[in-house]
Amino acid sequence: MSEQILSALRSGDFSTALTLANALVETSPGYSDPHYLQALALQSSGRPEQALAAIDRAIALAPDRSDYAMTKALMQIGGKDFVESQSGLMDALALNPNHLEAYVALLHIALAQKNLGEARRLLKLAERVNPDSDSVLVSKGAIANAEGSFDEAQKWYSLAAEQNPDNVMALANLGVLHLRRKMPAFAEQALSRAKALAPANIAVLRSLVQAHLDQNQPIKAEQAVSDLLVLLPSDRAGLGLRADLRRARGDFEGALQDATALLATKPDDLAVLNHYTTVCMQAGMGESAHTALERALTTKPDDDGIWQLLSIVQARLTGDGKTVIDRWLVQRPNSPMAQEALAVYLEATGDLAGAEIAADKSLEISEAFAMAQFVKLRQELRSGNPAAALQRAQALATRATTAESQRMILGWLGLIHDRLGEYPQAAQTFSQMATYTLN
């Protein structure tokens, strides 16, 4: 039965592996190997705490097995528990001073802790055991990568993969390196091979998703995300990305399912609510978004971002978000974002004097609110004060970071120069604006 369990693990059939391992433990609870195999199956099935309990039972039955101590340490590395994993690896080395993989694992912990000197020391110890091992070659690549020597890193990773085509770490690292070097097709090749060998490797799946996205392969990216979500059903990044991919191809029902699952993970988180709201509005489920936002405000009544999002949803549903802005100002009278929202609303509805007052209140608290700045800028132009508008626009230009914002502010600068009779400057500014193309 042991070989059947290992075969199921190698093929990615973790459910079968776990069923067989559980049965083996029931029939042979006094032997260490069944508990060891159960630990592997539990770890592969995404149950790390139960896996650690199982490997502890195996170690208790066979404390002299260095491979058990090594397995536990690797599980702890996966859980980012570096202190405990280092202790376990030292235990493995105490049982077997020539345990190559223990040196290699310690080396990678040192790299994770940005301790290059310790990593190089451990590499020398690993080379004393077996300098030609593919694990040692991968370690050389990892050190080179940490040093920024990407050509050398690629050389070592490639040599390791040639020497052992089933070395998942070599393939995964090679794939990630190709992604960094903007070679997604090569990355996909290496990562697909790594996934076939280790279908439950979360890091490999995430990198493979990125390789597909970088090649504009949305269907393949969605499948890779789905594989990830089988292992991590509540992964927020995965749920959000799959919702976006499904929405892009018109599958609003599927996108809404993912967005709803995403909302369940953190129902008062602004980024999650933004995602959920976007999907709901496109799927014609604006009331659901409204309900979710109202519910979030019961736990985070002072979150300006949620209030702003609710005002936008309210406006789209009813044509008027003023009732939400009024509630927002009662709750947060000194919020510059709420005052800005009021300024924008009042300007849009023709109350220019009220809009300027609200914009002033917003900017008195913080000058960082761009929409309030533009309300003031437009009012300065309307009231015949283009010199003040120019000064404001020039200040805004220093803070514009995206192509869209830079193009917009250049447009306003061109208009202001024209109002001031500075026609050469206006022409030059409009020409500069035309160089910013929007996707």
Image (spheres, helix red, strand yellow):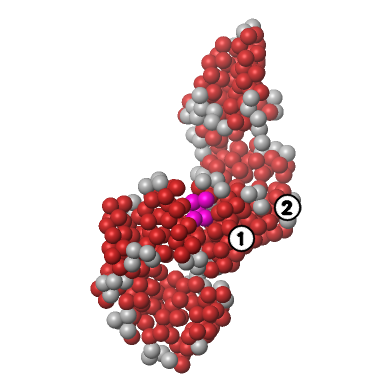
User: Where in the figure is residue 247, as x and y percent of width and height?
Assistant: 70, 52
- Which residue position is annotated with label 1? 224
Circle 1 sits in a helix, a strand or a loop, which is it? helix
- Identity of the amino acid at label 2? Arg
Magenta part of the chain: 174-178
Position of residue 37 relative to residue 156, above or below, is: below
Give neighbour class at mark 1: few <14, some 14-19, many 20+ (Cα, 10 Å).
Answer: many
Residue toward you, 223 or 253: 223
Most frequent secondary structure within the magenta stretch: helix
User: Where in the figure is residue 114, as x and y percent of width and height?
Assistant: 33, 51
Distance CA(mark 2)–CA(mark 1)? 16 Å
User: Does 382 lie within the magenta span?
Assistant: no
Q: Is residue 129 left or right of residue 77?
A: left
* Point 57% across, 53% down: residue: 186
Position of residue 351 relative to residue 415, above or below, is: below
When asked about the image quadrant of residue 230, the answer is: bottom right
Tell us which disc is closer to us: 2 or 1. 1
Q: Is residue 396 left or right of residue 98?
A: right
User: Where in the figure is residue 211, as x and y percent of width and height?
Assistant: 58, 53
Circle 2 sits in a helix, a strand or a loop, which is it? loop
* Point 49% across, 59% down: residue: 172
* Disc 2 and disc 1 in contact, CB within 8 angstroms: no
* Point 58% across, 56% down: residue: 188
User: Where in the figure is residue 118, as x and y percent of width and height?
Assistant: 28, 55
Q: Earlier in the sequence, mark 2 or mark 1?
A: 1
- Identity of the amino acid at label 1? Ala
* Any part of residue 427 in sight: yes
Position of residue 422 relative to residue 251, above or below, is: above
Q: Which image quarter holds the C terminus?
A: top right
- Which residue position is annotated with label 2? 249
Residue toward you, 325 or 110: 110
Residue toward you, 258 or 197: 197
